[in-house]
Amino acid sequence: MSVHRDVLAQSSAFFARRLAADGQPCVEIHDCEDAEIYVETVGLMYCDDGANKHRLLKQSVPRVLRVMKAADALGFPACVRSCLDYLEAVPWAGEEEERRVVSSVRRLQCTDGAGVSPLLRRVASSDSGCLRPPADTFAHITEMVLASTDERGRRETKALVLSLLKDSTRGHVGGGADGSPPTPGISSSETLYGSCRGCLDRLRRLLAEASSEPAYSAAVARRIALEADNLVWLVEMLVASQRACDGFVALWSGQAELAASHAGAPAASRHAVSRVTARLFVGVGRGEMLPPRDARLRLLQVWLQPLIDDYAWLQRAGGSRPAAFDRRLVEDGIGQTILTLPLEDQRSLLLAWFGRFLKLGDDCPNLQRAFEVWWRRTFVRPYACSSSG
């Protein structure tokens, strides 16, 4: 390249050192990784800051990152600042490009940070005093969803938040695929359990109100369904938070007073509450939740009968709901939960079910598969409690 010594020396610390040391009219560059961008960057030394920005407007983000890397290696701070101004203003195309931009900016050497800070504020706050902790922000988002009454808005935002929580939880546990460190968790079980307790308090009042009214109230039924739906969503998030749902099984199984109010309310008003119970049985049956044996037994003792009482309503209402009631999945979950208990408890629970099934038929969960396993354990291949001789 035919260039001017003064222009290069004034623009670039690298060339200023080389030209001063060599004292020759020619400088050879041997370690140039990107010759095309190198030539373009040297050409930018002939432009003022405004012209640099104008020329960068015609480039893509990946190309500007290449120019910025070459300018940084050459000690060309004016060009680096122009690149940073461009990157601060232009939209980034997706997570991968965002990662490249942030990584490139953090590796810069020939800048005092004045241009870096505005750009990085897009992904992180520079003022820790003005930034709410991630858990606080997550709690606020959760409460906004729980307070919403629009069906479509609730359905879509619940799915969105749950999907993002699952993704962030995977990042929190294993780190990035490129070896980056795990991201800090945005949610805590305390935050979610606080929301659960709020829903339970409201549900307790609503079921008491429904029990005290002689006639069915559509307004109360809608509010009960809303709180039950909130609890199911919170359970899903607890499941996504690395098996943090075990404690909710114990919390729900301890709601004997709530179950009593449930029994006194009209089935049309109360049946949505049994969706919470059904989700817990499915979770235990799948191994998504690992509550202790006492909690599993109390769950069955306190909530299985209310679920059976609501079973016909759940099946009729399930087809019209966004999350349809999956009878087979629920029945398998109930059966698997029973089969995790000692054989004596299996016997009492399954014989009680057997009598109800004979009376109710399709309006009762079909636990035939669990009954067959219990039968085999009891009559066909009984195991001794301890080895003999």
Image (spheres, helix red, strand yellow):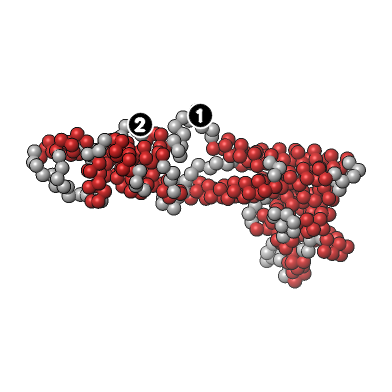
- Alpha-carbon neighbours of circle 1 within 10 Å: few (<14), some, or many (≥20)? few
Residue 260 percent across, percent down from the top left: 84, 45
Give me the disc on residue 130. Answer: 1
Residue 143 percent across, percent down from the top left: 65, 38
Determine whether 14 is above or below 178 in the image: above
The C terminus, quarter of image: bottom right
Q: Are marks 1 and 2 in contact (CB under 8 Å)?
A: no
Q: Secondary structure at mark 1?
A: loop
- Alpha-carbon neighbours of circle 2 within 10 Å: few (<14), some, or many (≥20)? few
- Amino acid type indicated by mark 1: Cys
| Upstream in sequence: badge 1 or badge 2 | 2
Tell me which residue sits at (65%, 52%) in the image: 289
Residue 329 visible in rendering: yes
Residue 354 visible in rendering: no
Residue 249 percent across, percent down from the top left: 70, 48
Tell me which residue sits at (63%, 54%) in the image: 288
Mark pair 1, 2: CA separation: 20 Å
Q: Secondary structure at mark 2?
A: loop
Residue 370 percent across, percent down from the top left: 74, 64
- Amino acid type indicated by mark 2: Ala
The mark tally for this picture is 2
Tell me where residue 199 sits by quadrant: top right
**Front in this rendered view, residue 322 or 278:** 322
Give me the disc on residue 114. Answer: 2
Tell me where residue 207 sits by quadrant: top right
Tell me which residue sits at (72%, 70%) in the image: 381
Tell me where residue 313 sits by quadrant: bottom right
